[in-house]
Structure formats: C-alpha cells, structure tokens
Image (cartoon, rainbow, N blue to C red):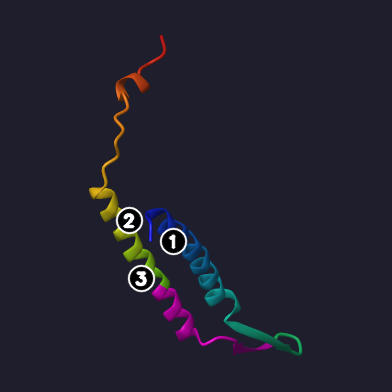
Amino acid sequence: MTVNELLVVEKIVRERLKDLKELRTEVSNKKTYYGDKESVKEPQYDIKKVDQKITQLQNFLMIADQKVKQSNAVTQIDYQPNVENLLSPLE
C-alpha cells in the first residue's frame, strides 16, 4: 500500500469512527414514551460491540499514523527550494 492510499483509508476510517461515536451516544438507545412523561429505554445495538469497533478503528489509525511518520522519516525528496528567496520580504 502506498502512503497516499493509506492516507485515503485513514480519512475514510476517521469518518466511520465519527459516525460510530455518534451512534454510541445518540442512537444506541430507543426511547418509548408512555403517557405524559414516562419513558423506557431499549438498547438497539450491543454497546460493547460498538465500543470494540471504535477501539479497533482507533488502533488502526494509531498504527497507520506511525507507519506514515516512519516512512516520512526515511524518505528523501529530491527538491531543494531556496527558502530565503521564497520567504524574503517584498521590496
């Protein structure tokens, strides 16, 4: 897998992780109202399975980030810009 491919997968996993966290906090329980203000909460998803999936995705992101940084640490780019010229003030 190339670094670019891994970065794309990381982006998709981050979106999925966000969705799962919202699911865990908002949709994991169903409220049923009876009468005026009486309600019953019924779990719609096994919260342990949701948490396991969240942890799995977080672990993937941690390892992928480490691999990208490791690759960046050893990869040389054949380009030497003139930084002084680029950042010099306008005359």
Q: Position of residue 58 (x, y in %)?
A: 39, 69
Quadrant the N terminus occupies: bottom left
The residue shown at (24%, 49%) is: 73
Classify mark 1: residues with Cα within 10 Å, few (<14), some (14-19) or many (20+): some
51 or 13, which is in the foreground? 13
**On the image, numbered disc 1 is attached to which residue?**
10
Of the numbered discs 3 and 2, the one sitting upstream in the chain is 3
Which portion, as a residue range, is magenta? 38-56
Q: In the drawing, what numbered circle is on residue 68?
A: 2
Dots 1 and 2: beta carbons under 8 Å?
A: yes
Q: In the drawing, what numbered circle is on residue 43?
A: none
Of the numbered discs 1 and 2, the one sitting upstream in the chain is 1
Q: Is residue 31 above or below residue 68?
A: below
33 or 15, which is in the foreground? 15
Quadrant the C terminus occupies: top left
User: Mark 3 is on which residue type?
Assistant: Asn
User: Mark 1 is on which residue type?
Assistant: Glu
Provide the secondary structure element on which disc 1 rests.
helix
- Gap in Å between the C-alphas at discs 1 and 2? 11 Å
Q: Position of residue 22 (x, y in %)?
A: 55, 70
- Gap in Å between the C-alphas at discs 1 and 3? 11 Å
